[in-house]
Image (spheres, rainbow, N blue to C red):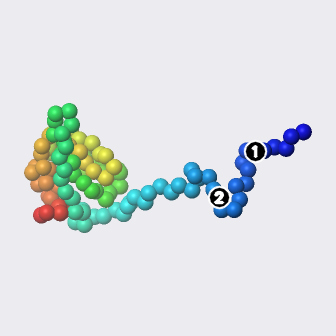
Amino acid sequence: MKEKLFEMGADLGEGWSSDNKDQRSPKVSTEIKVPEKHQLYFAKEKRRGKVVTIVKPFYLENATLQALLKTLKKKLGTGGTVKEDSLEFQGDIPAMLRKHLEALGYRFKNA
């Protein structure tokens, strides 16, 4: 009978390891800050010919960020969504958005 040349789950030994087992996910800052500690800024993108206003970075829990989005969408009368640590709104509305966020206590980088 032939000796087995390869066994499933074989010991790699001598410091060798499988490539996909030791990968660590990048550390994402999950520190939650009060509104006064935020340093927000605006970005604009054009998607399918329409302007999208992006405000980031927010350091809030996802549920809190969703509630903030809902409040701002009602006040501004526009659509929007949450993407990771940012809020995206339909339209070119940075001035109105800034006014409402500052009223809620948020700060901006170049204020």
Q: Going by the image, does 79 lie left or right of 33?
A: left
> Disc 1 marks which residue?
6
Q: Going by the image, does 19 lie left or right of 66?
A: right
Q: Nearer the viewer, residue 24 or 3?
A: 3
Counting residues from the start of the chain, the first of labels 1 and 2 encountered is 1
Q: Going by the image, does 106 lie left or right of 15?
A: left
Q: Please say whether residue 29 is visible from this viewpoint.
A: yes
Q: Could you tell me which residue is drawn at 13 percent across and 54 percent down?
A: 98
> Disc 2 marks which residue?
16
81 up-or-down from 40: above or below: above
Q: Nearer the viewer, residue 25 or 106?
A: 25
Q: CA distance from mark 1 to mark 2?
A: 16 Å
Q: Amino acid at mark 2?
A: Trp
Q: Amino acid at mark 1?
A: Phe
Q: Please say whether residue 73 is visible from this viewpoint.
A: no
Q: Could you tell me which residue is drawn at 18 percent across and 39 percent down?
A: 46
Q: Could you tell me which residue is drawn at 16 percent across and 33 percent down?
A: 49
Quadrant for the N terminus in the image = top right
Q: Going by the image, does 109 lie left or right of 15?
A: left
Q: Residues within 10 Å of mark 1 (few under 14, many from 20)?
A: few
Q: Could you tell me which residue is drawn at 19 percent across and 50 percent down?
A: 43
Quadrant for the C terminus in the image = bottom left
Q: Position of residue 50 (x, y in %)?
A: 16, 35
